[in-house]
Image (cartoon, rainbow, N blue to C red):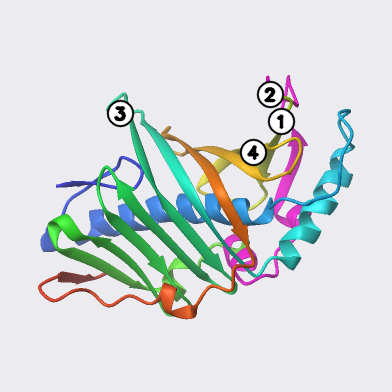
Amino acid sequence: MAQGFFGVTMIKNSSNKSMLTENFLTINFSKWVAALIFLVFFSFSAGIAQEIAPIDDTVQKLQLVYEKTGDFRSAFTQETFNKSLKRTMTEEGSVFFKKPRNMRWDYSKPEVKKLIINPQKAWLYLPREKAAYVQKADNIFQSATLLRFLSGLGKLTDDFQINYAAPEALDKHGNYLLKLTPKEKNSYLQALGITLDKDTYFIIQVSFEDLMGNITTLKFSNIVMNADLSDKLFKFQPPAGTNIFDMP
């Protein structure tokens, strides 16, 4: 067995494909949502006074930045609290995104693994186990909200109810705290918590809880917008000797 991206145990057994498929879809959906929200909430350079701006003004500026962002790359640290195991796992790596519908998560610590999505396929590669799981992208992009954002057509207020966090809209450092609740009825996520740097408006943290009660926190650093990422970054060819599992 191997640890899944969010602390979910993945059983690598060809006779257990239904369980594997469920984990593959559920785990990666959460990650993609977190990443697209990170994209949506990229920084903007306009100076803002210390008093809290009306939420509609903040959302409008964030929407404009989203529309102007073609791609990005960033380092990240991920902390996942597994409710059933009652433990927290910390991982590190780099994330890349490019419109439309391209994403790559390269985990480097404590274990190397890769999640690569392009308009045709989604790959989950676990080199230590010499295993790769592949699925058609059309089967992955079943969420209307997710598809709109990854295609560059998303609008925040159409897909999320957005408010400043309660009871505090600022953290102890003066950074802005937002709460996003998906309007899509079949969303796998209940809500997302977003922390915006008070000076740059970079996303410095995203937190969310899945339907199983697991809590994931992503912290971003070294953010580069519109980096002219190559399409080759989102292609994947399994190394020789890798066991490939086709998922329905």
Seen in the picture, residue 115 relative to 187 is either above or below; the reply is below
**Residue under label 2:** 171
Q: Position of residue 98 (x, y in %)?
A: 56, 70
Q: Position of residue 89 (x, y in %)?
A: 32, 33
**Label 4 Cα crowd, 10 Å radius (few <14 / some 14-19 / many 20+):** many
Q: Position of residue 36 (x, y in %)?
A: 58, 57
The amino acid on which the numbered mark 1 sits, given as a three-letter code, is: Asn
Q: Mark 1 or 3 closer to N-term?
A: 3
Q: Position of residue 212 (x, y in %)?
A: 40, 36
**Residue under label 1:** 175
**Label 1 Cα crowd, 10 Å radius (few <14 / some 14-19 / many 20+):** some
Q: Going 81% across and 48% down the picture, which residue do you hit?
A: 59
Instruction: Using the numbered discs, state the Cα–Cα distance from disc 3 to disc 4 in whole angstroms.
Output: 25 Å
**Residue under label 3:** 84
Stretch in magenta? 146-172
Q: Which of the two discs, 3 and 2, sits closer to the camera?
A: 2
